Image (spheres, helix red, strand yellow):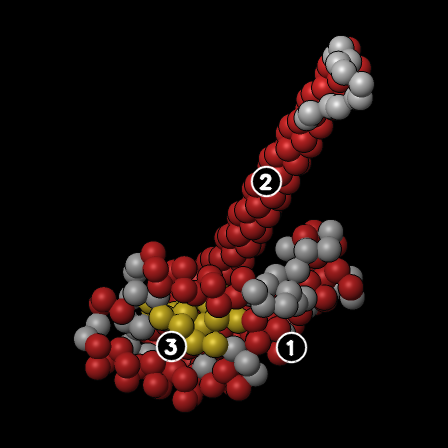
């Protein structure tokens, strides 16, 4: 995405997809949307389409109630900045409708592009990267706090309890450490998943750009063919007109020759044409 921006390419629109089948806008979904907003930046939200899908998985009244909750609560800050809502009903037509809403947008620069290219920031120092860093830092703080608490409990148990109590505390500490290890692994998995999602979004953007380029080239080729055909028709008409003019000149010369060679009769000259 940064390379495209360096080469002068900007995005006409960005699509964010949320499953209407989800019962609630969960913590993970909220963090994902926060990171998405930081990727785009406030000034680019007017080119964002917030698409809900999986409408076939819920009853219409339930889906509409969830949609109202999204627009009045979780997605409202983005909508207030110009973002638009749309539905994808698992049909080609609804997908085309979404695309048509962004193809004529004035291209914008995403905040992540501006930060990486113009401000030369490392991706971890961008606003989107800081969201991930905050989550990882918070998880690390919780891990350290839990570990410290477990250690304090273990020390207290060592002072006031006998060996059996100390053994139970140690086992609890190991259990919590294992839970924290799994939590760290889960955070790393989520971070990897988000990076992959960003890469897929970049690939999709490049694919759409390539499709647009091909369409422009095809339109230009068609226009050139039409111009060439028109030029051929004009040239053919000119040749036909020239041939007709030469034929008429030839006929005039022949008539003039006939007049000059016609024998004279009587006392006067009379030419009938």
Q: Position of residue 126 (x, y in %)?
A: 68, 68
Residue position marked by numbered label 3 in the rendering: 26
3 vs 1, front mark: 1
Which is nearer the N-term, disc 1 or disc 2?
Answer: 1
User: Can residue 234 be seen?
Assistant: yes
Q: Residues within 10 Å of mark 2 (few under 14, many from 20)?
A: few
Which is nearer the N-term, disc 3 or disc 1?
Answer: 3
Residue position marked by numbered label 2 in the rendering: 226
Secondary structure of the residue carrying tag 1 is helix
1 vs 2, front mark: 2
Quadrant of the drawing holding the N terminus = bottom right
Q: Quadrant of residue 250?
A: top right
- For image coordinates 62% across by 73% down, the residue present is 44
Kindly indicate whether the residue at mark 3 contacts the one at mark 2 (C-beta within 8 angstroms). Answer: no
Secondary structure of the residue carrying tag 3 is loop
Alpha-carbon span between mark 2 and mark 3: 56 Å
Q: How many marks?
A: 3
114 vs 146: above or below: above
Report whether 72 appears left or right of 266: left
Residue position marked by numbered label 1 in the rendering: 43
Which is nearer the N-term, disc 2 or disc 3?
Answer: 3
230 or 10: nearer the eye?
Answer: 230
Quadrant of the drawing holding the C terminus = top right
């Amino acid at each position: 995405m940064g390379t495209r921006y360096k080469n002068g390419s900007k995005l006409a629109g960005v699509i964010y997809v949320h499953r209407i089948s989800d019962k609630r806008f969960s913590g993970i979904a909220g963090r994902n949307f926060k990171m998405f907003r930081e990727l785009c930046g406030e000034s680019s939200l007017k080119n964002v389409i917030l698409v809900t899908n999986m409408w076939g998985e819920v009853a219409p009244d339930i889906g509409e109630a969830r949609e109202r909750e999204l627009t009045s609560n979780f997605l409202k800050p983005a909508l207030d900045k110009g973002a638009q809502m749309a539905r994808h009903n698992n049909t080609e037509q609804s997908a085309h409708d979404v695309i048509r809403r962004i193809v004529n947008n004035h291209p914008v620069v995403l905040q992540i592009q501006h930060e990486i290219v113009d401000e030369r920031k490392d991706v971890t120092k961008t606003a989107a990267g800081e969201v991930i860093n905050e989550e990882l830092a918070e998880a690390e703080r919780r891990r350290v706090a839990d570990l410290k608490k477990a250690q304090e409990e273990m020390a207290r148990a060592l002072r006031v309890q006998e060996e059996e109590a100390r053994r139970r505390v140690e086992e609890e500490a190991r259990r919590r450490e294992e839970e924290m290890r799994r939590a760290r692994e889960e955070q790393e998995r989520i971070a990897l998943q988000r990076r992959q999602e960003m890469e897929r979004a970049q690939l999709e953007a490049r694919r759409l750009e390539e499709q647009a380029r091909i369409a422009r080239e095809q339109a230009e080729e068609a226009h050139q063919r039409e111009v060439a055909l028109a030029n051929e028709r004009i040239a053919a008409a000119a040749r036909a007109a020239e041939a007709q003019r030469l034929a008429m000149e030839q006929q005039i010369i022949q008539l003039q020759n006939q007049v000059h060679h016609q024998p004279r009769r009587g006392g006067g000259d009379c030419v009938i044409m």
